[in-house]
Amino acid sequence: MSACMFVRDDLGRHVSTRKALVYGTATKVGPESRDITIKSDGQEEIKTFNFHALVIATGASTPSPLLGLNTNSAALRETWIEFRNALPATRSIVISGGGPAGVEVAGELGEYLNGRTGWFSSSALSNPKVFITLITSGAELLPALRPSIARTAEQYLAKIGITIIKNTRVDSVSPPDTGRTFFSLTSKATLTLSSSSVLEADLYIPATGTAPNTSFLAHIPNLLTSSGHITTNPQTLRVTLETAYPRIYAIGDCSTFF
């Protein structure tokens, strides 16, 4: 996915002869020619802008369009509405990813669809209205946090009917793009797990982290890491190739220092 530049309309009041707001998608940066190419939103028009200094803050995209601002706010709201409209007919949901996003989504859906067993109950919900499965490749949920927090989260999820499968990955999904685009958001899915088990889901939500929006920089040698992040000096926020490409900075989720 190319990086997108979205600026709130009310920032237009700051535009002057020395400033400009540009709505579009960055398609290429010329670090030696000191220019950036932008494709205007909804048009085929290509514009090139010269720069003295460049700050790259294009963020990252989530595998599910439900979980991040992958395009724009209007599209995100439309995605939420589409998903919510599908919930009344849903009987099974699979979520992959045992990090904060996956756990939060499982918790929100479990409480909304299944309710609770009661604040003081210590037992799991035995007969949920909707079967929700959370799959994690780790030995525990929320691996970046203390084990006690992970255990507490697991107890709460059990009370709202969440089944947790650990040490397991989703090897394949059929159809392959299910849950990853607006048009496949509410499609049924067949998931094959690394344990060779097969799950059927009315809804599938991939919540396995993010990918930096840096594809428009892939042509620049040695700028990106193997994960696609921009190699950045944590002291100056300049790209680490600053001797070759001076005054180019990277901040946020697209960089190695965020």
Image (tube, rainbow, N blue to C red):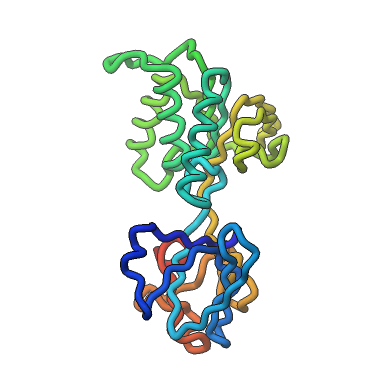
Residue drawn at (34%, 62%) of the image: 11
- The picture places residue 61, in percent across and down from the top left corner, at 52, 53
Residue drawn at (62%, 68%) of the image: 45
**Which quarter shows the N terminus?**
bottom right
Residue drawn at (46%, 86%) of the image: 246
Residue drawn at (55%, 76%) of the image: 36
- The picture places residue 109, in percent across and down from the top left corner, at 45, 27
- 189 up-or-down from 241: above or below: above
- The picture places residue 215, in percent across and down from the top left corner, at 60, 65
- Dividing the picture into quadrants, the one containing residue 219 is bottom right
- 26 up-or-down from 50: above or below: above
- 118 up-or-down from 202: above or below: above
- 105 up-or-down from 27: above or below: above
- The picture places residue 93, in percent across and down from the top left corner, at 56, 26
Task: Determine whether, in the image, residue 195 is placed left or right of residue 38.
Answer: right
Residue farthest to the left? Answer: 120
Q: Nearer the viewer, residue 173 or 169?
A: 173
Residue 169 visible here = no
**Which quarter shows the C terminus?**
bottom left
Q: Nearer the viewer, residue 20 or 152?
A: 20
